[in-house]
Image (cartoon, rainbow, N blue to C red):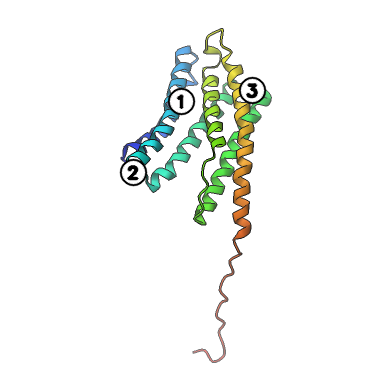
Amino acid sequence: MLTSLPNLLTLSRIAIIPPVVGLFYVPEAWAAWTGCGLFAAACITDYVDGYLARAWEQESVIGKFLDPIADKLLVAAVLIMLVAFDRLTGVSVLAAVVILLREVLVSGLREYLAGLNVGVPVTRLAKWKTAIQMVAIGFLIVGDYGPASVPSTAIGTVGLWVAAILTFVTGWDYTRVGLHHMMAVPPRHSAPRATKTAHSA
């Protein structure tokens, strides 16, 4: 059911996007920290909703559909805002590009393989990538509003590059699996159309 707690937690990650984006437009420390807190809470729900769905046997088709979409929407929105507000600049923007392109690629592969009834399990390396990516984005949201003794922007930038490298590796793993199944599927030939003969009524 859409109103089950796991699904509501998933939907909360989508609902939290507008306030997180809006807080970027407030040039105050409290806004940066609030945005970071909301983002962190959303990341926690990403773990909790899946755990509860399995523990309470409430896994659903709509939940499996919404979960990856909610994650990708949240990450894409925040990365775009980080670039727009110069908290991610120069060559480091490429790290965000790699992450976003990988998400599009994996989404397409999952959709194609789902049509073949082939599941693509999340690897341990992909989980590490996600964890590092989320922590790095949190530091970047705080940016220069963090404590003077903690170089938040530098830490976030380095973390995002690490996540981008892992993103490239895991993206290639998913692509290799997808290509294997694509090559194994024989081409479908359409049935020949019946031709009308001179004796047809």
Residue annotated with mark 2? 57
Report the residue at 52% width, 24% height from top. Answer: 135
Q: Are marks 2 and 1 in contact (CB under 8 Å)?
A: no
- Whether residue 11 is visible here, answered yes or no, is no
- For marks 1 and 3, give the CA distance: 21 Å
Residue 35 placed where, x, y %?
46, 21
Q: Earlier in the sequence, mark 2 or mark 3?
A: 2
Estimate the x, y position of residue 122 in percent, counting from the top left. 52, 41
Asked which secondary structure carries label 3, the reply is loop
Kind of element beneath mark 2: loop
Q: Residue at x 44, y 39 (%)?
A: 67
Q: Residues within 10 Å of mark 2 (few under 14, many from 20)?
A: few
**Does 125 sit left or right of 46 as displayed?**
right
Residue occupying image coordinates x 55% and y 31%: 128
Q: Residue at x 55, y 21 (%)?
A: 140
Query: Label 3, on which residue?
Result: 89
What kind of element bears circle 1? Answer: helix
Depth order, front residue of 90/179: 179
Q: CA distance from mark 2 to mark 3?
A: 44 Å
Against 83, residue 191 (above or below) is: below
Question: Mark number for residue 39?
Answer: 1
- Amino acid type at circle 2 is Glu
